[in-house]
Amino acid sequence: MSLPLEGLSAIVTGAGRGLGRAEALELARLGASVVVNDYGQPGRDGSGTASAGPADAVVAEIVAAGGTAVAHTGDVADFAQARALVALAADTFGKLDILVNNAGILRDRMVFSMSEDEWDSVIRVHLKGHFNTTHFASVHWRERSKAAGAPVYGRIVNTSSEAFLAGSAGQPNYSAAKGGIVGLTTSTALALTKYGVTANAICPRARTRMTEDVFAGFGVPEAGDLDPLAPEHVAPLVGYLAAPAAGRVNGQLLVVHGGMVAVMERPRVCAQFDTAKDVFTYEELDAVLSPYYGGRSAGETFAASEVLGLKRG
């Protein structure tokens, strides 16, 4: 019996640790040949000397389990290195079929305290990094489709976050980048569907090096039980979205964690007000909008634990 991803090749960025590692292992388990990309910096803020160690270690795990994998240690936020990453997959395995964008860093600070570099660096790695690899993968698929005169096989799985959905007070850079990734995903889904390519985004909830303080004390497992926030809960959805079975899933945003997958709707209109004349006046807007929002305090907020349904262990 063949495996779902047998004969397909994949790139997973940020795959040296955490979610990316779990996703790379799952794609390999399902039969894909995998390029394991990781820049290898030890700090979750992107600090420290880059190292091939994390990517090489995951490649070794895949090979030891009988799979096929190669390492790439470039920075996906660098345009030229992203080009080299896609070329490595195509040259090594003959083509690229699956792109999983996961690489990212954190530089958390309140918006009134955030420096320009803290903003730029997070946007660069998350949002530009997703764009760079998507750009070169889409060029690859478009050229193959034109040469074949028919659609080809292509899957993109991008990584957004519930920080975009629910807000995160100390992460204006991260929240903005993750929202931008959703916009990039839906635009890409529309642009590439005629070439046979789908693009979807996930909002994973997982306890990793990136989120160890965010989820400290939440959902702590009993001794011997699987952590409900383990990355292994997320990886199977990535495997599914990468597979032929998900050919009709395109331009979607899914929240995933601990045995739960939620399909998110696009934003909907919850109220509409029409002017009685040709153009709204200040007075008319005050008359219709102020009562609508009158039951809410000006600084109304929700704790992340309430919005995301987290429970402390």
Image (tube, grey):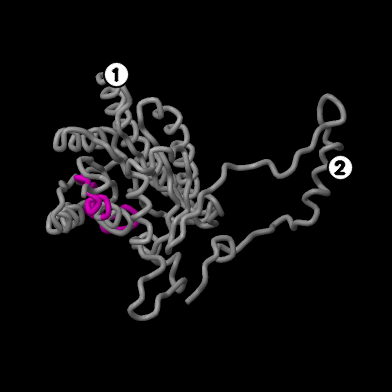
| Residue 139: % across, % down | 30, 26
Mark 2 and mark 1 lie on one chain; the one further toward the N terminus is 1
Residue kind at label 2, given as amino acid type = Ala
Q: Which residue is mark 2?
A: 287
Q: Determine which of the numbered discs, if any, sits on residue 149 in the image.
A: 1
Secondary structure of the magenta portion, mostly?
A: loop
Q: How far across and down, in percent of the image, does residue 289 sit? A: 80, 44
Is 256 above or below relative to 278? below
Q: Residue at x 26, y 43 (%)?
A: 11
Can residue 213 be seen by looking at this rendering? Answer: yes
62 inside magenta stretch: no
Residue at point 25%, 19% (across, down): 147
On the image, the x and y values in percent for residue 17 come to 27, 58
Compared to residue 258, the image places residue 51 above or below, namely above
The foreground one among 58 and 107 is 58
Q: Which residues are magenta?
A: 26-49
